[in-house]
Image (cartoon, coloured by chain):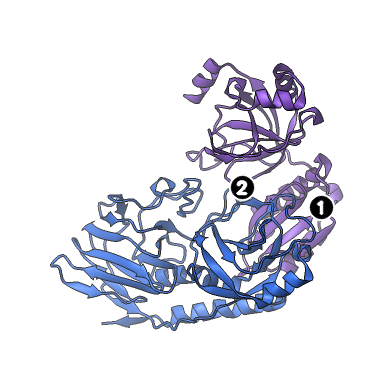
Amino acid sequence: MSNFFFKVLRPGINSTFQDKGRYHMQHLGVTPGGCMDLDLFSIANALVKNSSNEGVLEFAYQGPLLKLINGKTKIAITGNVLFQIIKSNNETIKGECYRTYDMDKGDQIDILATKKSSYGYMALEGGFDIKPFCKSVSILSRAQIGPNEGKKLKIDNKINIKINRNNNKNYAIKISSKNESTIRVLKGSQFDYFSKKSQKDFFSKEYKISNLTDRMGMRLEGEVMENIVNTNIRSEGITKGAIQVPADGQPIILLTDYPTIGGYPKIANVTSVDYSLLIQKTPGEKISFKLIELHEAEQLYKEHLKSISKIIKEIREIN
Amino acid sequence: MLKRLRNIGDCGIVCDFGDEVNREINTGVIKLFHHIKNEVSLGNLNGILNYTPSYNKLIINFDLKKINSSKIIDFLKSVNFSTLKLSQSSKKWKIPICYDFEMDLENMSKTLKINKDEIINIHLNTDFFIYMIGFIPGHPFMGDLNSKLFLNRLKTPRVKIPPGSVGIVEKFCNIYPYESPGGWNIIGRTPIKLFNKKDEKEPCLLSPGDSVKFKSISKKEFEKLANE
């Protein structure tokens, strides 16, 4: 183990290590987890020239304040994030997302807030020195699985880093952000449990994202969905983005840390192409749903992956 | 038997075995689960991320970068169900339980009009079959309990139930792997760890399709096993 590390001076609201997630274990009750926004995760690693599944630090709303106690590193922040780097001589650099910065012993990174978005990412050249559990470094805090004893960052935690910086170049990329509020979905398994009026309402009315939103699920407030068959179903396996409607008629979208099985009827399922867009919405924002067909969802996702590859190819060296 | 295949979102497939919940239907689900798991481990089916059995369904999750719904449905249609077997890897477990840690026996006895010892006896003599594991890591849903012991959930769920607590509702029995809230009728507690983070190869003791019989132990034996 290297002796290069950060010390956590402020943990932030929900700061965890994440990668693509932990698979082949859902039948044992272990949800895949992983980065909420896999697009930003890929771009963060690409900026610091890491392999595509290197673990990163994910933060939500208010991020951490970290001090590099020993070593030198290169970092990149992705998302729509307000941050600054405080050099050891107290000089402050206003941070720009989607570019790399060198950090030296004694420097601090202060991740102040995610702007008009929920999640942001910090990648390090070479990666964090954290122990995987079942091939993934994703922290599942509900079950206390993953590095850092499966817990969110806490004050005074020590974060080890794998290597000292050895690339003396820096990189950047321009990203234009979309502000779309329509989320494309597919019909859910129990779509026909809901009245004709509710089926229509679901695709024509707006829903407000409530404060009860976290990595596990997003609760919505809006038109009550009227269930005309049964408000419970036999518990069955869950997929990411399932929109379930409990007896109170208010939809809940199951997100990355979803429970592995669930017993509420599902009216719809968020498409893969719009998942990152959805999870970046913040409590209080309004969204609406648009029904599309499976083949369209598959085609749109292919195009989306191409656009992410294109972004990664456009990463350029800066001075 | 498999009744219907359909997509669930753009990266999941539901294999629906019908509406009933019984051991025979679940055995069909478990057989297909073992088959898929095996095909994935042999590298015959790329891009599969998870296969989650429940009472009457198997949900297959996949990576849309590598495979899509129609390819998985084609694969499932080619499966010869009559040749699928319950895997050799299905295990029989003896799980120690200390009934002194019950929380609801008094009320159960009143509601069911059966004395406490008889309730314990029926529970001890049941061969439980694991229908599924889930919600949280290692949490088994087991059946079938004798209909004499059928009970509803508690009207007000408890805020905290200690780990290892064994609960019953309707024909099902579960074991809480973690301290958690819950509404099941608690009949006892096991000192056995259902999910062990230190064992990366097999962190989860039980698996869907395994069978379980309980073995009564004293408080002293409980403490001893709990400290191991």
Which residue occupies the foreground of this view, B178 or B89? B178
Query: Disc 1 designates what residue?
Result: B17
For image coordinates 76% across by 21% down, the residue present is B114
| Amino acid type for the residue under numbered disc 2 | Phe
Query: Disc 2 designates what residue?
Result: B135
Q: Colour of chain B?
A: purple
- Residue A279, x across and y down, in percent: 52, 68
Q: Is residue A305 shown left or right of residue B122?
A: left
Do the residues indicated by labels 2 and 1 lie within the same chain of the protein? yes
Q: Is residue B63 above or below residue B83?
A: below
Q: Colour of chain A?
A: blue
For the residue labelled by badge 2, is the local secondary structure a helix, a strand or a loop? Answer: loop
Residue A312 shows up from this direction: yes
Q: Is residue B75 shown left or right of residue A17?
A: right
> Subunit of mark 1?
B
- Residue A151, x across and y down, in percent: 41, 48
| Amino acid type for the residue under numbered disc 1 | Phe
| Residue B158 picture quarter | top right
- Residue B27, x across and y down, in percent: 79, 43
* Mark 2–mark 1 distance (CA, rounded to whole Å): 21 Å
